[in-house]
Image (tube, grey):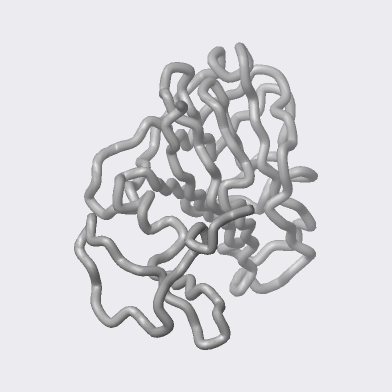
Amino acid sequence: MLSNNFWLKGLVGQAVAYNAPGTEQAAKFDPANGLLVSPFRGAYAELARNNRVFFASAAAVTLPVNASSLASKFGVYNPPNSGVNLELINATAHAVVATTVVDALGLYYSNGTNATGATFTTQGTVQNRNVGGPSGAAQFYSAVTHVGTPVLLDLIGGWGAVTDGGSTEISKDFNGSVIVPPGTLLALAMTTAASTASGITLGMSWAEIPIQ
């Protein structure tokens, strides 16, 4: 039998001030005895504050269809000795010119020697979401050629035949549900046919979590 003192106790009311780190504070309850849980900050704010959230983008590219020896225009590489897992947050794509291509955008990966043996041609910029913060472990490439055929991991979305390049964003929120271990090379590529020339702008965000 548990003592009555074992149960969580607190005060009915609202917090009235921001407390400094390390300050002891009683739990707060509503008048119906429900524990008050406040979304004080965004889901990734603490990771971003600790220089753990990153972003890469590619503007107005001709995105190829996935195939053997994929010549990727958007590759995110977690090197073998990075010491971190990448937790994907989201990926977004815009059709930036009018197009009649009916297509879907896929998230693909290569690992093992298919990743480490890739030809890394053009390295791009990775932005720290803590603006001005240091670089992370993952690398972004606007030109990288895979070994073999990358494996489809997920679908970001797709386009029907359109005549207006505006308002054609597709996006996928992963919220950390995809874990990318060291030695893995990601790619965003079309599933069916190459995009219209210089027609796609892409972005991807991820968090870097140290491997315990």
Q: Which of 47 and 171 is in front in this view?
A: 47
Picture residue at 44% right of the left edge, 36% below the top: 209
| Residue situated furthest left in the rendering | 20
The percent coordinates of residue 14 (x first, y second) are 37, 83
Q: In which quarter of the image is the C terminus?
A: top left
Q: How many marks?
A: 0
Q: Which quadrant of the view contains residue 166? A: bottom right
| Residue situated furthest bottom in the rendering | 31
Picture residue at 35% right of the left edge, 41% below the top: 125
Q: In this view, does 50 lie above or below 98?
A: above
The percent coordinates of residue 29 (x first, y second) are 47, 78
Asked whether, in this view, residue 58 is left or right of residue 96, the answer is left
The percent coordinates of residue 90 (x first, y second) are 56, 53
Asked whether, in this view, residue 207 is left or right of residue 147, the answer is left
Picture residue at 57% right of the left edge, 47% below the top: 176
Asked whether, in this view, residue 42 is left or right of residue 183, the answer is left
Q: Can residue 200 be seen in this view?
A: no
Q: Which quadrant of the view contains residue 40? A: bottom left
The percent coordinates of residue 119 (x first, y second) are 52, 19
Q: Can residue 22 be seen in this view?
A: yes
Asked whether, in this view, residue 80 is left or right of residue 67, the answer is left
Q: Which of 39 and 173 is in front in this view?
A: 39
Q: In this view, does 76 lie above or below 88?
A: above
